[in-house]
Amino acid sequence: MPGHTHPQLRGKLAGGDRKEVGAAASVAREVLDDPGLVRPLVDCLEDGDAAVVSHAAHAVMQVGRDEPNVFAPHADRLIAILRRCSQWEIGEQLPKVLAAVPITDDQTQQLADILVAQTGNPSNIAAASALSGLAELATTGRIDAAIARDAIERALASPRKALAARARRIEQSLGPKGK
């Protein structure tokens, strides 16, 4: 439930330009050292300040890279935040984290549906991250590879050159179609 933001954590995330990662690395280290800060960090993803949300998304990604399991109790909320995708940084970072978090089959299906929709995100970064998330779910056997391949095929046909290029790289990483 939002509203339990840790004031010092939020203050650190509020510093700096939204376009920079700010204090995300130091906040991530704090959260890794004190798992009680996971919920306040997730709260920051729903903050009204775009810089806080951006920096929190980067911190979540860094924590998730090292300890994805800490987000398992927050998976439903993270999926809901990704569904709303209020900022491109959320669309960029949450697929990376959620693809690594141990989630239920139902949550995996919800995530896959959101990622398929996110491939149409106006942000090339968010759309490409959604493709990567689908590829990760497919290569780990959590979704049918055809779902990822269909999204990749659509992206390959996209007039958005950056997205099509990312789709080509992801397609190569998936290997032959029979896989």
Image (spheres, rainbow, N blue to C red):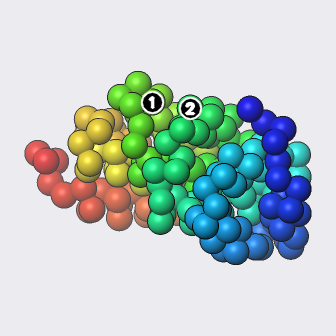
Q: Which residue is mark 1?
A: 107
Q: Residue at x 46, y 50 (%)?
A: 69
Question: Which quarter of the image is occupied by the N terminus?
Answer: top right
Q: Mark 2 and mark 1: span between their CA atoms? A: 7 Å
Residue 90 in the image: above or below residue 173: above
Identify the element where label 1 is drawn. Answer: helix
Q: Which residue is mark 2?
A: 76
Three-letter code for the amino acid on which mark 1 is drawn: Gln
Pick the residue in front: 4 or 15.
4
User: Along the polypeptide, which appears first: circle 2 or circle 1?
Assistant: 2
Q: Residue at x 34, y 50 (%)?
A: 135
Q: Residue at x 82, y 48 (%)?
A: 5
Residue 4 at what x, y percent from top left?
81, 42
Whether residues under marks 2 and 1 lie with C-beta atoms below 8 angstroms apart, the answer is yes
Q: Quadrant of residue 61?
A: bottom right
Residue 81 visible, this orientation: yes
**Left or right relative to 66: residue 148:** left
Residue 30 in the image: above or below residue 89: below
Q: Residue at x 14, y 54 (%)?
A: 176
Residue 169 in the image: above or below residue 140: below
Q: Residues within 10 Å of mark 1 (few under 14, many from 20)?
A: some
Residue 133 visible, this orientation: no
Residue 80 at what x, y percent from top left?
62, 32
Three-letter code for the amino acid on which mark 2 is drawn: Asp
Pick the residue in front: 153 or 59.
59
Q: Residues within 10 Å of mark 2 (few under 14, many from 20)?
A: some
Residue 136, numbered label: none
Identify the element where label 2 is drawn. Answer: helix
Residue 164 at what x, y percent from top left?
45, 57
Residue at far left of view: 178
